[in-house]
Image (spheres, rainbow, N blue to C red):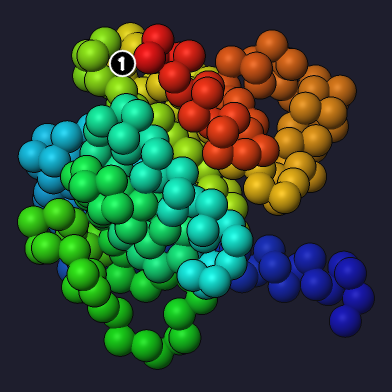
């Protein structure tokens, strides 16, 4: 088919869709709207997330891959980090409540005998398609977590968990090694920080745990490529996050940040 013919077909198709929508009956429009997830359901889930945060307390939110095995050195590092930070900041440890790096953070906090909270999602990345979603955490008590259906509610809840309501709150975001889902969470949070939309007057530290240079390429892209392109300034990036190669670096930074 020629380019002209293809363009003509697209134009006809677009016009047909427009005509179809304009002539749709009110009943058809209502049926289409009702097939979408109810906004009320999202709001209800948000309320549940916020209530969990209020009950367990704000603290450090860990982002990271659900696929990393317990035998991996990054899992071991993350578990140790979560234990030390929980001791140092004396706060609740939060994560997406899943496996991998999230589990490392959870276990680290439990090693420190500190409170833990989790906002799970029905199906994590890496789980086989067709797998029945698990809404139960394998070892946390039911009052320490909830299972979300909506990613938006889950992310809002985790952001709220690290938002300092008062100057006394000791919180942070810690980006452990992760994949696409982790990057989604990272950049949404960084955008909120950049635009000062965390709904707090108190700064919240954001740490990249650059174990074995796992985030080196991303950090170079931000600091070199995007900055040289003019999409962000070096000063903005310095205000957004700090990169730590070791747990010792992260602990030293948080102690200095909170004057401990």
Image point (49%, 19%), residue name: 195
Number of residues whose C-alpha sits closer than 10 Å to that of mark 1, classed few (under 14), some (14–19) or many (20 or more): few
- Classify mark 1: helix, strand or loop: loop
Q: Which image quarter is the C terminus in?
A: top left
Residue 66's spot in the image, x, y percent? 47, 66
Give above or below for 206 relative to 67.
above
Q: Which residue matches tag 1?
A: 200
Residues 50 and 213: in front is 213
Image point (25%, 20%), residue name: 169
The quadrant in which residue 201 appears is: top left
- Horizontal side, residue 3 vs residue 129: left or right: right
Residue 46's spot in the image, x, y percent? 19, 46
Residue 100's spot in the image, x, y percent? 46, 65
- Horizontal side, residue 166 vs residue 96: left or right: left
Q: How many marks?
A: 1
Q: Which image quarter is the N terminus in?
A: bottom right
From this viewpoint, which residue is outermost toward the right? 2
Query: Quick check: can you spot residue 212?
Result: yes
């Amino acid at each position: 088919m020629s380019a002209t013919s293809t363009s003509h077909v697209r134009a006809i198709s677009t016009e047909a869709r427009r005509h179809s929508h304009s002539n749709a009956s009110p009943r058809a429009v209502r049926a289409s709207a009702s097939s979408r997830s109810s906004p009320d359901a999202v709001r209800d889930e948000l309320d549940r997330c916020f209530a969990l945060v209020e009950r367990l307390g704000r603290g450090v939110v860990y982002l990271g891959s659900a696929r990393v095995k317990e035998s991996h050195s990054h899992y071991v590092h993350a578990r140790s980090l979560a234990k030390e930070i929980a001791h140092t900041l004396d706060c609740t440890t939060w994560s997406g409540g899943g496996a991998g790096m999230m589990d490392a953070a959870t276990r680290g906090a439990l090693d420190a005998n500190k409170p833990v909270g989790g906002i799970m999602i029905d199906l994590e990345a890496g789980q086989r398609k067709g797998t029945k979603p698990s809404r139960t955490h394998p070892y946390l008590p039911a009052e320490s977590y909830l299972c979300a259906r909506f990613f938006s509610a889950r992310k809002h809840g985790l952001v709220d968990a690290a938002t300092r309501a008062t100057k006394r709150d000791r919180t942070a975001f810690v980006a452990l090694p992760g994949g696409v889902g982790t990057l989604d969470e990272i950049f949404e949070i960084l955008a909120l920080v950049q635009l000062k939309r965390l709904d707090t007057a108190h700064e919240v530290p954001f740490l990249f745990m650059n174990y074995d240079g796992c985030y080196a390429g991303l950090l170079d892209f931000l600091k070199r490529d995007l900055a040289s392109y003019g999409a962000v300034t070096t000063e903005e990036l310095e205000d957004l996050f700090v990169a730590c190669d070791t747990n010792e670096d992260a602990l030293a930074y948080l102690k200095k940040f909170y004057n401990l």
